[in-house]
């Protein structure tokens, strides 16, 4: 068997040619007529030419086909970019997300403290929560509600200057203007009326008010914004709670973060 896959006969010096032809025929030289050879040659040449033409056509098609694909690529490249899974509306400053300021028309005062305002839905649920806590012997006191961007500027820059804090140091304790949850009208700072000395202090988590909030706040659609070791790197604030009980508040606090649902044990 040769490389092309055809059988090869063994070459013998004595019987190389015509061993299968009778002697009488073998000894008589036969010269085929020229008229018979010419059509055969023409036929072979025609077939070879056809095959050659087909090969050339196929080769040219092979060369031109990729060119058409390449020419079509700019149309795809110039189209709109494919959206990524990464959120496009994340805007942070020193670890704090940007939040819009609530319209004045959507703010109402909290009956427990007329000096503070929240959005209507949040204020109503907060008052329900205060009443439920009081029936259990716990006094929830609002310390701060809605704050405008202008209010936040004074709190951030003036207090930071008084305490000789850098912006990064100040941001660990208070959000920069335009990046406070209090702008939204959904956030509230809560204290324990029985132990006011713990107001805005981390030891607030030792009070009955905090323990009650941990056990019951979710029933009123409130949650703590900055627990220990939170992903934003903001200092632990057990007194800071936010309302997430309607579509607007839920999207405002969660849409930019791309968080996954919490795992719950069956």
Image (tube, helix red, strand yellow):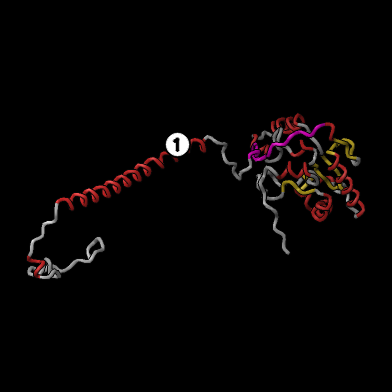
Q: From where the camera sits, is residue 103 visible?
A: yes
Q: Main secondary structure of the magenta part?
A: loop
Q: Residues within 10 Å of mark 1 (few under 14, many from 20)?
A: few
Across and down, in percent, residue 266 comes to 73, 64
Q: In the displayed image of the protein, which residue is found farthest to the right?
A: 135
Across and down, in percent, residue 200 comes to 78, 43
> 85 left or right of 212?
left
Across and down, in percent, residue 25 comes to 11, 67
Q: Tell me which residue sits at (90%, 52%) in the image.
A: 132
At mark 1, the secondary structure is helix
Comparing 47 with 130, the one in front is 47
Q: Is 185 included in the stretch rendered in magenta?
A: no
Q: Which residue is mark 1?
A: 71
Q: Tell me which residue sits at (15%, 70%) in the image.
A: 20
Q: Tell me which residue sits at (80%, 48%) in the image.
A: 222
Across and down, in percent, residue 26 comes to 10, 66
The answer to which image quadrant residue 118 occupies is: top right
Stretch of the chain drawn in magenta: 88-103
């Amino acid at each position: 068997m040769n490389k092309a896959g055809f059988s090869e006969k063994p070459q013998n010096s004595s019987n190389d040619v015509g061993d299968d032809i009778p002697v009488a025929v073998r000894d008589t030289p036969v010269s085929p007529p020229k008229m018979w050879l010419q059509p055969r040659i023409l036929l072979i040449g025609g077939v070879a030419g056809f095959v050659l033409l087909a090969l050339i056509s196929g080769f040219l098609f092979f060369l031109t086909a990729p060119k058409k694909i390449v020419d079509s690529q700019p149309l795809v490249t110039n189209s709109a970019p494919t959206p990524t899974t990464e959120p496009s509306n994340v805007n942070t400053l020193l670890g704090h997300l940007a939040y819009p300021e609530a319209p004045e028309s959507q703010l109402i005062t909290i009956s427990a403290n007329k000096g503070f305002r929240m959005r209507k839905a949040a204020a109503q649920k907060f008052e329900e929560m205060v009443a439920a806590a009081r029936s259990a012997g716990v006094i929830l006191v609002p310390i701060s509600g809605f704050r405008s961007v202008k209010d936040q500027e004074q709190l951030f820059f003036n207090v930071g200057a008084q305490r000789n804090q850098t912006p990064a140091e100040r941001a660990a304790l208070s959000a920069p203007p335009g990046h406070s949850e209090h702008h939204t009208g959904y956030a509230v700072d809560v204290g324990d009326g029985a132990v006011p000395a713990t107001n805005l202090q981390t030891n607030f988590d030792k009070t009955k008010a905090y323990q009650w909030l941990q056990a019951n706040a979710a029933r009123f659609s409130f949650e703590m914004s900055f627990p220990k070791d939170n992903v934003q790197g903001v200092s632990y604030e057990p007194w800071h709670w936010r309302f997430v009980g309607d579509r607007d508040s839920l999207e405002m606090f969660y849409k930019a973060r791309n968080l996954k649902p919490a795992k719950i044990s069956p």
